[in-house]
Image (cartoon, rainbow, N blue to C red):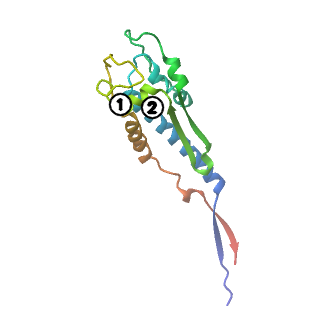
Amino acid sequence: MKINAKFKGLTLDLSKYRIALAQTLQEAISQAGFAWLQAVVSAIPSWSGASRGTLIRLASSLNTGVDITISNTAPYDRTALGAASGDGGVDITGAKDGKVSFKYSTSLAHLIWNEYNNANINRDPTKWRHVQLLTPGPYNFQALGQAAVKSVFQGVRLPDPSKFIVGKAIRG
């Protein structure tokens, strides 16, 4: 008795999967960065523009802006000081390998102080000692941003690998 059979060998088209993965991750990190930025801006006041100015580089890399309105009571526009004191951006160069990120950092002393302290009670030793801040902190913007990112990431679904499985006939 002779039996003829046809078998299919299954392989994953890894290059196409990586392209789909990169697209998914790029979209996810952009959404997460934007959500982080919105949450943070809602917590950081815009008095002289310095604190929100630290977010400009990150916002620019997300193709958006930061709402910075200078108060009439501010001595002058200090947005440039903030921009020079902040860094940030989105990195998607490793998206095909599953690595994407965004970052933000600042060296603006009073923003760092106000993140953790009520400056009307626990005065920043490097700043005005007799000024009552309208929004004294603590801002807790890092926790708000983290919660926003977590919310976005909970909705991210990676591409279904089964859609990239290719069968090839094997003669038996």
Query: What's the residue type where badge 2 is placed?
Result: Leu
Read off the residue under disc 1. Answer: 139
The one of 13 and 128 positioned closer to us in this rendering: 128
The quarter of the rendered structure image containing the N terminus is: bottom right
Q: Residues within 10 Å of mark 2 (few under 14, many from 20)?
A: many
Q: Position of residue 6 (x, y in %)?
A: 66, 75
Read off the residue under disc 2. Answer: 37
**Furthest-left residue in this view:** 121
- Residue, x 64% and y 52% (percent of image)? 16
**Furthest-right residue in this view:** 171
13 relative position to 104: left or right: right
Gap between marks 2 and 1, in whole Å?
14 Å
Mark 2 vs mark 1, foreground winner is 1
The one of 64 and 126 positioned closer to us in this rendering: 126
The quarter of the rendered structure image containing the C terminus is: bottom right
Q: What is the secondary structure assignment of the residue under circle 2?
A: helix
Query: What's the residue type where badge 1 is placed?
Result: Tyr
22 relative position to 45: left or right: right
Image quarter of residue 163? bottom right
Q: Is residue 99 above or below residue 121?
A: below
Q: Position of residue 108 (x, y in %)?
A: 48, 26
The total of numbered circles placed on residues is 2
The one of 166 and 80 positioned closer to us in this rendering: 80
Q: Position of residue 142 (x, y in %)?
A: 41, 37
Q: Is residue 8 above or below residue 153?
A: below
